[in-house]
Image: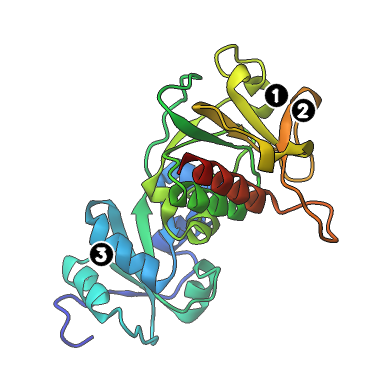
Amino acid sequence: MTDMHKTPIIIASPDNRTFKALCKLTDARGQKKQDRTLVAGAKLVSEFVHERPGECCSLIVCDGFQHPGMDDVVRQFAVQGNLTMLKRGLFSQLDMFNTGMPLLEVLTPVIPQWDCHLTGQGCVLALPFQDPVNVGAAARSAAAFGVRQVVLLREAASPFHPKSVRASGGAVFKLSFFRGPSLPEVVQLPDVAPHIVALDMQGASILHYSFPAHFLLLPGIEGQGLPEKLRLRAVSIPMPGAVESLNAATAVSIALFCWSTGQR
């Protein structure tokens, strides 16, 4: 790092104000309060820096670690004075995926309130998932199959939790998210309820289902599933194998694939 214009101060104390603020970004409450999150993984970090430079806040690195393939990114943040260097013990508390690579602190997009209407053509995905990994995985599939709007129900984990970001491969930053009501309340929306396509293992086979021109795809909460009234008109994914149910995000992915295939 001898060619860098500015040498960062190495943070060694867990009581350091900057470190304590960064620690709060590892949970949803801290992210919401600061409107920031952490992006992990060399590929994701490099892509974010290149594609969304105005939303980057700081780069966090571990003192003494090498960063193969990321020297230019580290140098860029050092020159800007936005490089935070932590002692190994502190860095490991933030590096929840044990990548050993730089972490990027970024601004999270504002999530507006959903107006509870379906407009235009295609699929709007509603997510009640409480596991941030499932939220991220479902968001990744949504982006892959052409969904552009995702409604986060009140039960849902944040799409910008570090686990969501990593599971999505960065796709959460390419979708339009909206804050919606709770899962039971969705069923009561007069303009939405008739257009809900629910997922439940007791529903009719999705292989023989014709998706409407516009609809809200609604999976159930992990474990609990859907409200009873929705199960009566849900679609299901046939499973001839030896398991009773699919992972929630996997079921969403298959349903979106079936819809996308039908569109083509």
Amino acid tagged 3: Asn
Residue neighbourhood size for the residue with mark 2, other residues' Cα within 10 Å, grouped as few (<14), some (14–19), many (≥20): few
Query: Which residue carries the number 1 mark?
Result: 184
Q: Earlier in the sequence, mark 1 or mark 3?
A: 3
> Can the viewer see residue 137?
yes
Question: Is residue 103 visible to us here?
Answer: no
Q: How many marks?
A: 3
Horizontal side, residue 184 vs residue 125: left or right: right
Q: Which quadrant: the N terminus?
A: bottom left
The image position of residue 111, as x and y in percent, is 42, 35
- Residue, x 41% and y 29% (percent of image)? 112
Q: Nearer the viewer, residue 163 or 62?
A: 163
Q: Do the numbered discs 2 and 1 sit on residues whose CB atoms are within 8 Å?
A: yes
Q: CA distance from mark 2 to mark 1?
A: 7 Å
Describe residue 110's horizontal placement relative to residue 155 as left or right.
left
**Kind of element beneath mark 3:** loop
* Relative image position of residue 94 (x, y in whole percent): 50, 67
Tag 1, which secondary structure? Answer: helix
- The residue wearing badge 2 is 227
Residue hosting label 3: 82
